[in-house]
Image: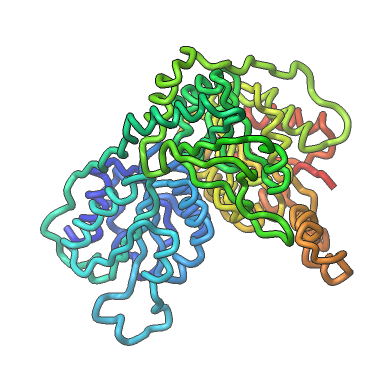
Amino acid sequence: MNGAEAILKTLAENEVEACFANPGTSEMQMVSAFDRETRVRPVLCLFEGVATGAADGFARMAGKPAATLLHLGAGLANGSANLHNARRAYSPIINIVGDHATYHRRYDAPLTSDIEGLAGPNSVWVKSAETPDEAADLTSEAIVASQTGAGGTATLILPADAAWSEASRIGPKVQAPARAKPDDKHIGSIAEALKAARKPVLLVGTTALTEAGVEAAGRIALCGVRVMIDTFTGRQPRGAGRYAPDKMMYFGEMALSDLEGSDLMVLAGTKTPVAFFAYPSMPSVLVPPGCALDTLATPDEDAVYALQALAEHMSAPAQAVLVDAAIPDASPVGELTAYTIGASIARHMPEGGIISDDAVTSGLPVYLSTKAARPHDWLSLTGGAIGQGIPLAVGAAIAAPGRKVLSLNGDGAAAYTVQGLWTMVRENLDVVVVIFANHAYRILNIELARTKSGNAGPEARRLLDLGDPRMDWVAMAKGFGMSATRCETAESFDAALEAALAAGGPHLIEAALG
């Protein structure tokens, strides 16, 4: 047994089931080891950003770590944008990055780089193995690190000789420590503050948004507390039969206007809300003037327990107000818009559906339209780095076989990680990819005005326009082996979505919005 096999066996013994990979020469021992340790499923991705995004999607849906296998610092750098999104989702990932053999590092070969420096910003833990046995032990350590507190990416740097040399053991079977529970006295003081406030707000983040956490938050809402969730969360259970909290608005001035008059904001599993960007003459912190701020539970703490305990301290009713199902019974007609697409998704998405949202300006209309759809999970673009939608859907589909996955993508965002379509076909994943084809970075047209950058002239417009030449998404999908269709009306989209969901397997629908 060499070091590579010891790593895979350690992963398998600790119930890590999938490894999303784009390997190179320094990872060949790991590649070979998959033939001898078959409990970890290897999934080839044609771009590292697909591998890291898929690991994020798997972790969000499985609630446990996925692994990646990346080629040196260059491969890690290619995957960093979706590791950034995964960090904001607190997704547990075991990020294995190959390195040159220990004795070869000093020669500064062409692919030599500062892997530790590249990994640090998006990792909660980074270590390099120098021997096969150390590699096995560090694998177990990485598994714990990825699930400690809020969770995150643990990056193990693996020199080639630590992978090919003989190992004497595998790493131990481990268990991450339970999240710390906030002090009951502190929870009681928060309850009293909420009761005393005139217009209190409870802001709930990713680590509290489990089924139990949402239910507890809904009970607290019946005590006169406005419950909101962060604009972008890792995973939100929603739809009929669930409590539906408000969402923090994206634009800062709209968020502050919406919160006007609030005198207490309590945070549960999240941090102080801030504007996505700085704008001239606009505040950064989204807490209105005169509003006190307090924390019920940090992301590292057990925020679900804290919400449940808070509901008891407030003598909240036993059950929240739940959303009644409201499924459209007829196809939308006429012009194809994000709202008609949302209506069709609400009409046809089966119970247990998963939505991976990277639709940018088209995402909110679909979100609003599916509030009373059949129960489903919504996965948001947590870190704002577009190009997540397709990879996230890959991982979600592998983590949750038997559940339909819808991947919603702006055309500009989808172009970042279009290679993920190939993986969907190769793995025969049950995913319907929707491309909102408006042929522009529409959000940037909005931001140009908001940043007071002046009116776009002909050269500026060329940096925001995607219509010259227009991308043919049907042709691209078919080039990757995926069935695809283009829709120009609400009726044709509704029919195409119904057929794709019924057929199973991977399909792409290009929604022509402009």
Up-down: is 138 above or below 202?
A: below
- Pick out the residue farthest to the bottom: 107
Up-down: is 116 above or below 91?
A: below
Q: What is the tally of numbered marks visible in this picture?
A: 0
Quick one: 378 or 178, which is closer to the camera? 178
Relative to residue 221, is residue 60 drawn left or right? left
Q: Residue at coordinates 47% horizontally, 56% vertically from top-left?
A: 83
Q: Residue at coordinates 48% horizontally, 43% vertically from top-left?
A: 270
- Pick out the residue farthest to the left: 168
x and y percent of residue 461 in the render?
Answer: 84, 65
x and y percent of residue 469 in the render?
Answer: 81, 62
x and y percent of residue 476 in the render?
Answer: 69, 53
- Pick out the residue farthest to the top: 318
Q: Residue at coordinates 75% horizontally, 33% vertically from top-left?
A: 341
Quick one: 287 or 72, which is closer to the camera? 287
Up-down: is 305 above or below 29?
A: above
Up-down: is 378 above or below 159?
A: above
Q: Is residue 137 visible?
A: yes
Tell me how the rendering is colored. Answer: rainbow
Q: Is residue 396 visible?
A: no
Quarter containing the N terminus: bottom left
Relative to residue 163, is residue 346 drawn left or right? right
Quick one: 484 or 224, which is closer to the camera? 224
x and y percent of residue 445 in the render?
Answer: 80, 57
Relative to residue 26, is residue 85 drawn left or right? right
